[in-house]
Amino acid sequence: MPAWNEENSVAAVVADVYAALPGVSCLVVDDGSADNTARVAREAGAIVASLPFNLGVGGAMRLGFKYARAHGFQQVVQIDSDGQHSPSDAPRLLEALADADIVIGARFAGVGSYEARGPRRWAMRLLSAVISRVAGTRLTDTTSGFRACGPRAIRIFAENYPAEYLGDTIEALVIAARKGCRLVQVPVAMNARTAGVPSHNPVKAAVYLGRVTLSLVFALLRPPSSYQEKAA
């Protein structure tokens, strides 16, 4: 769980994770928060790793994958700490890992009422179309931050998870597909944020579209040989 200034929501999400998946290890990566996110998460029962300054979701997730690899975990679920994802959906993502390396919790697959409009939705459709082609399967929500990863993806992401803006959603899937990982999706519903401030707003939608396009181009231009993967 990457977390940046989520002291008002992280405890409830940690509790929901333990309720949905009894016995799991819950790691909260405090991404340089200026509030009490780390303390609140630790009091809720989570393992907490604190970064000295904000690196963004990609940097937090790379640390999470390194932790998973170092401790021998074979499955990882990425879930937001703001309450938008339902931990009760996580078991379905884990079940789908039986036939896949990465399972995406898809918001635009017939479940729930989540909508994105204007340039932001156009960007999401562009990404889904291109990454579906790269992965050789139909994906409808490639910007979802709700994902499950198996052993192969953990090994790859521990070494290569992109820290750049949007890389955590876009380039990560391109990397995985080019390394031969099988990607699938499971329909999920999205909740409203329980606290905090959204990463984007309508005013920034056009800028988001431009950044998404550039990020996708750079991801596709990067040679696959530059990605590392340590042996199991």
Image (cartoon, rainbow, N blue to C red):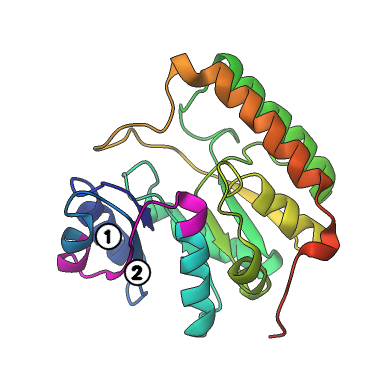
- Category of crowding for the residue at label 2, using alpha-carbon neighbours closer than 10 angstroms: few (below 14), some (14–19), many (at least 20): some
In the rendered structure, the answer to whether residue 136 lies left or right of residue 69 reads right
Within the magenta stretch, is there residue 151? no
In the rendered structure, the answer to whether residue 57 lies left or right of residue 140 reads left
Q: Position of residue 213 (x, y in %)?
A: 70, 30
Quadrant in which residue 152 is drawn: bottom right
At label 2, the amino acid type is Cys
Between residue 58 and residue 98, name the one nearer to us: 58
Instruction: For the residues labelled 2 and 1, say whether their Cβ atoms are less than 8 Å apart.
Output: yes
- N-terminal of the pair, mark 2 or mark 1, is 1
Q: Is residue 8 visible?
A: yes
Quadrant in which the C terminus appears: bottom right
Report the residue marked by disc 2. 26
In the rendered image of this protein, does residue 29 appear above or below residue 184?
Answer: below
Residue drawn at point x = 16 percent, y = 62 percent: 39
Residue drawn at point x = 45 percent, y = 38 percent: 189
Q: Which mark is residue 91?
A: none
Q: Position of residue 121 (x, y in %)?
A: 60, 22
- Category of crowding for the residue at label 1, using alpha-carbon neighbours closer than 10 angstroms: few (below 14), some (14–19), many (at least 20): many
Looking at the rendering, the stretch of residues picked out in magenta corresponds to 41-59
Residue drawn at point x = 52 percent, y = 35 percent: 111
In the rendered image of this protein, does residue 138 appear above or below residue 37?
Answer: above
Q: Position of residue 54 (x, y in %)?
A: 38, 51
Report the residue marked by disc 1. 14
At label 1, the amino acid type is Val
In the rendered structure, the answer to whether residue 50 lies left or right of residue 74 reads left
